Image (cartoon, helix red, strand yellow):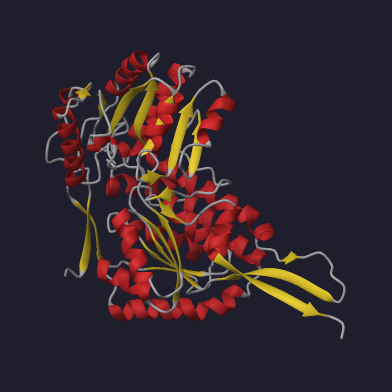
Amino acid sequence: MSKQLKTISPIDGSVYVTRDYASPEQIAQARERATAARQHWKHTPVAKRMAICRRMIDAFTAEKDSIAEEISWMMGRPIRYAAGEVAGFAERAHYMINIAEEVLAPTTLPEKEGFQRSIIREPLGVVFVIAPWNYPYLTSVNAIVPAILAGNTVILKHSAQTPLCAERIHEAFAQARLPEGVFQYLHLSHEHTEGVIKAPEVRHVCFTGSVSGGAMVQQAAAGRFIGTGLELGGKDPAYVRADADLDHAVETTMDGAFFNSGQSCCGIERIYVHEDLHDSFVEKAVELVKRYKLGRSDDPDTTLGPMVRAKAADFVRSQIGEAVQQGAIPHIDPTRFPMDQKGSPYMAPQILTEVTHKMRVMTEESFGPVVGIQKVSSDEEAVSLMNDSEYGLTASVFSSDIETATQLGEQVDTGTFFVNRCDYLDPALAWTGVKNSGCGCTLSHLGFDHLTRPKSFHIKTSL
């Protein structure tokens, strides 16, 4: 096993970052520091924790330009969009800070003669956060900031594709004068990651990644009676009703499908369009996508960057090729995008019609720049197809009839339901999934429930 991680940039295939993996001794020391810091941090007033987190955000956002450049080189997001992740990080962190004091306050029950009763929220202890590369800051902030606000200590393991993200967050907390041991990061191999999950000091694991990765986390944690928050895959659907605003639906769903080169767990991967709008929708969608510019992520004119690696792009190409063999119709000529090449992370976007659920591209997570559009004749057919999936992260309906669209949302198996929008996390709403999209919850006031445990006080005041 290699003792170093190497981050290969999808821009040009160069080695962008090299880091040594943490040794067993360094891992043990990190666990010891996190455990030692627990008691002091647990008893630190919430207001002080909030102030430190606010200073962290200030320090982090001050480096937005260099952070954006690093994101672009590490995972391929176009530089014109990369700074948006810094803004999203700050938005989510500020929301969790602003509600922390109220959410974490003790609950005092109504007076009962001769008794005092209350419930407090106790931190769990050491929280292990395992973060992915596709939205390296937005996924990690969902767990890191509320965990620290709640009085836990945190160890972060970031993807080998985006190791500088862990270092940037650590630097920002250091500038904010967070006490030693409260937040640490480790560059870990898969074997050592599994070892940390099994470590007795770790009392909760937050994981964002693949379904197979989530299964590994649960297997490693089995028998220890600790919590696991798992945000896993998605095959998120959108349904465009006959009464939808066509231009808005096209613009929104295409952005939801192709932003970040389709590498979003809550991106739109399949679209069902009512037969009355289907042909017009497809025509407008194709014209819009043809205007995308595929290119290097560091080019300010690029609107569609490379996928994270060539292997991922070739997987999506295989889905498309198989679907076409089964009768799907491709609408984008890859030659319009000169950088597209088999065996390369640069991949042209693709829109497919005449698709069915017998095709992998409509049932298996693509995580790339392709979307299938299927014609439907009724709301009932659309809902049935939306639910015909092993995933359930988000789903969208586009309609001018908000009441009917909302009623359809009640029938869809999903963690988040949108009307007339998609692919967005509101930090005030619970972020969760059903089926193979995972379990647990981050964001909103409910996110704190998974990072604390209730402790009841039942005091008899008169004898």
Residue 159 makes an appearance in the image: no
Vertical placement of 147 versus 443: above or below?
A: below
Please tell me which residue is depicted at 48% across the width and 45% down the height of the picture.
415
**Residue 350: percent from left, percent from top:** 24, 28
Task: Answer with the quarter of the image where residue 112 lies.
Answer: bottom right
Q: Is residue 335 visible?
A: yes
Q: Is residue 165 above or below residue 122?
A: above
Residue 1 lies left or right of residue 111; in this view the side is left
At x 37%, y 45%, the residue is 391
Rendered residue at 20%/34% (across/down): 347
For residue 197, above or below residue 66: below
Figure quadrant of the C terminus: bottom right
Residue 121 locus on image (x, y percent): 63, 68
Q: Is residue 421 left or right of residue 150?
A: left
As rendered, which of 289 and 87 lies closer to the eye? 289
Between 385 and 198, the one lying in front of the other is: 385
Is residue 291 or residue 450 the one in the foreground? 450
Residue 258 in the image: x percent, y percent? Answer: 33, 33
* Residue at 24 percent of width and 34 percent of height: 358
Query: Looking at the image, which is closer to me, 380 or 34?
Result: 380
